[in-house]
Image (spheres, rainbow, N blue to C red):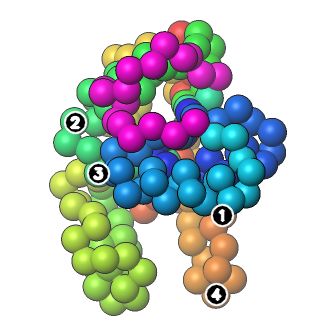
Amino acid sequence: MAVGGGLLCEPMSRLGANVTGIDASEKNISVAKIHSSKKNLKIKYYCSSPEKLKIKDKFDIILNMEIVEHVEDVNYFIKNSSKFLKKNGLMFVATLNKTLKSYLFAIVGAEYILRWLPIGTHEWNKFVKPSELVSYAEKNSLKVKKIDGVVFNPLKNTWNINSDKSVNYIALFQKN
């Protein structure tokens, strides 16, 4: 299951995964359905958040990518996402760290200076420190396996995994 609609669903489907995508935005789901239909991809899409999703499916992998920094209650979101994860299943969570550097890069830089994102996309008070995310995960039967930094190189227009978690990071959890 990929939370956040079609951005990850299509490549995962093309790689052979059986994919379910959810997004709380009807517009995002509509666009994703049209786009995947044109490409003959068999992806199940639901307009929902994890706490409102009414399916009985359990998943081997859940991708919560760039979403937890937008939810009101991260613990509640992780709890409701993890209920769809099979035992020993994996959950990836990519998000923004709550640091001065992340404020400068993600809000001032990406929204106000470079205009890569609409102004107001992010609220710094919703950014999540890795230690907080680990705490929420552990409360919900998830064990941290790995946390890496994710850094953008504007000269090469590439993202790279490294040890710098000061702005973006990705965490891997396994369900107990």
Quick one: label 2 or label 1, which is nearer the N terminus?
2
Q: What element carries label 4?
A: loop
Q: Name the residue under label 4.
A: 155
Q: Nearer the viewer, mark 2 or mark 1?
A: 2
State the CA–CA distance, disc 4 to disc 1.
13 Å
Q: Is residue 59 visible?
A: yes
Quick one: label 4 or label 1, which is nearer the N terminus?
4
Q: Are marks 3 and 2 in contact (CB under 8 Å)?
A: no
Observer-nearest residue: 162 or 22? Answer: 22
Measured along the vertical axis of the image, is residue 37 above or below residue 137?
below
Q: What element carries label 3?
A: helix
**Given the image, on which type of amino acid does mark 4 rest?**
Leu
Q: Are marks 4 and 2 in contact (CB under 8 Å)?
A: no
User: Residue at horizontal 27%, vertical 64%?
Assistant: 122
State the CA–CA distance, disc 2 to disc 1.
29 Å
Relative placement, left or right, of 36 versus 144 is: right
x and y percent of residue 48 in the render? 36, 37
x and y percent of residue 12 in the render? 71, 45
Relative placement, left or right, of 136 versus 28 is: left
**Given the image, on which type of amino acid does mark 3 rest?**
His
Q: Is mark 1 on a helix, strand or loop?
A: strand
- Locate the N terminus and report the quarter of the image it occupies: top right
State the CA–CA distance, disc 4 to disc 3.
28 Å
Span highlighted in magenta in the image: 44-60
Q: Are marks 3 and 1 in contact (CB under 8 Å)?
A: no
The residue carrying pointer 2 sits among few (fewer than 14), some (14 to 19) or many (20 or more) residues within 10 Å by Cα, namely few
Q: Name the residue under label 3.
A: 70
User: Residue at horizontal 81%, vertical 39%?
Assistant: 16
Quadrant of res 74: top left
Q: Which mark is residue 73?
A: 2
